[in-house]
Amino acid sequence: MGLWEFVILLFFMPILVLIIGVMISKGRVRTLRPGGTRRRQYFYGGGFSSLITGEYKIEAEIDLINGSEASTFIDAFNRWGFDKKEMNLINPVVVTGPVQAFDTVRLNRGAIRKIPLFKVGKDGRVRGYSSTTFILGFTEKQIALYSKIWNVEDFDVSIRTEEIFYKDVVSISVIDTTVSGRQYYKLTLQVPGTDFSSGYVAKGSFNYERIQAVKNLIRDKKME
């Protein structure tokens, strides 16, 4: 190793150690997806990277990630461990879509700015830095819930399952939000102290007859 290489190593080593230390302190060393930082910048407005790569290409990359990460009912069923005969009341509900989230950035003089990580693309489709597959299955006594969350920057994936008794359900509803003048909707199941929500999808992506069937089932089960 030459003198200059040694000097450069000494200069950057403390920075590298600090970065690794911060990552470890959060419980893991993040493993970035190839091009992950560029995709995060897309939600900040693109910047220089979007001029080089093109937003259409970044959006295609995001769609590819979401398509590969999205779960199916079989994925949830295998996690729950129920017998198939137990889940024959009504068809399950499966919703995959982006999560509305924000990055908090500190500006000069202590000012804080929130940057939405949720964007309508060049093709009119809404995308998010993070997305989720939200699945509800129904047995005689309870609702089986499955939620998987991932993002477009690294390989961090979170999967959660819950079993909720019908009597504990406060409500199930479709909630809307407006992004760039367009309406998007998510499904929310509320229980005492918390709620569980799907990602956002376009209005036509919801089967409202199935949602109404779920509401009717919950109402009937609460009256038993």
Image: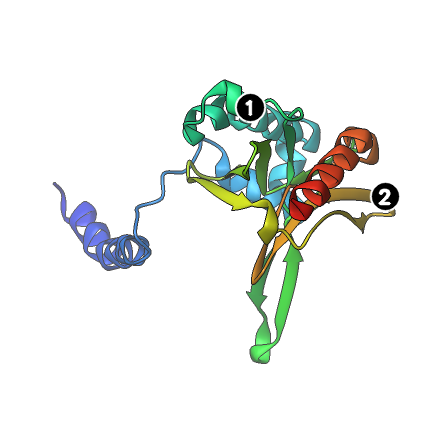
Out of 138 and 161, give the one closest to the viewer: 138
Q: How is the image coloured?
A: rainbow
Per the model, the C-alpha gap separating discs 2 and 1 is: 29 Å
Residue at the limit of the structure toward the bottom, as seen here: 109
The amino acid type of the residue labelled 1 equals: Phe
Mark 1 packing: few (<14 Cα in 10 Å), some, or many (20+)? Answer: some
The amino acid type of the residue labelled 2 equals: Arg
Eyeballing the image, is 20 above or below 183?
below
Which picture quadrant has residue 14?
bottom left
Q: Earlier in the sequence, mark 2 or mark 1?
A: 1
On the image, numbered disc 2 is attached to which residue?
A: 182
Number of disc labels: 2
Q: Position of residue 202 (x, y in %)?
A: 79, 35
Q: Which residue is found at the position 56% from the left and 78% from the top?
A: 110
Eyeballing the image, is 64 above or below 149?
above
Q: Quadrant of the C terminus?
A: top right
Residue at the limit of the structure toward the left, as seen here: 1
> Are circles 2 and 1 on residues that touch, CB within 8 Å?
no
Q: Position of residue 194 (x, y in %)?
A: 57, 58
Q: Quadrant of the N terminus?
A: top left
Q: Helix, strand, or loop for circle 1?
A: helix
On the image, numbered disc 1 is attached to which residue?
A: 73
Q: Is residue 202 visible?
A: yes
Residue at the limit of the structure toward the front, as seen here: 224
Q: Which residue is found at the position 64% from the left and 40% from the top?
A: 98
Q: Is residue 120 visible?
A: no
Image check: 59 left or right of 181? left
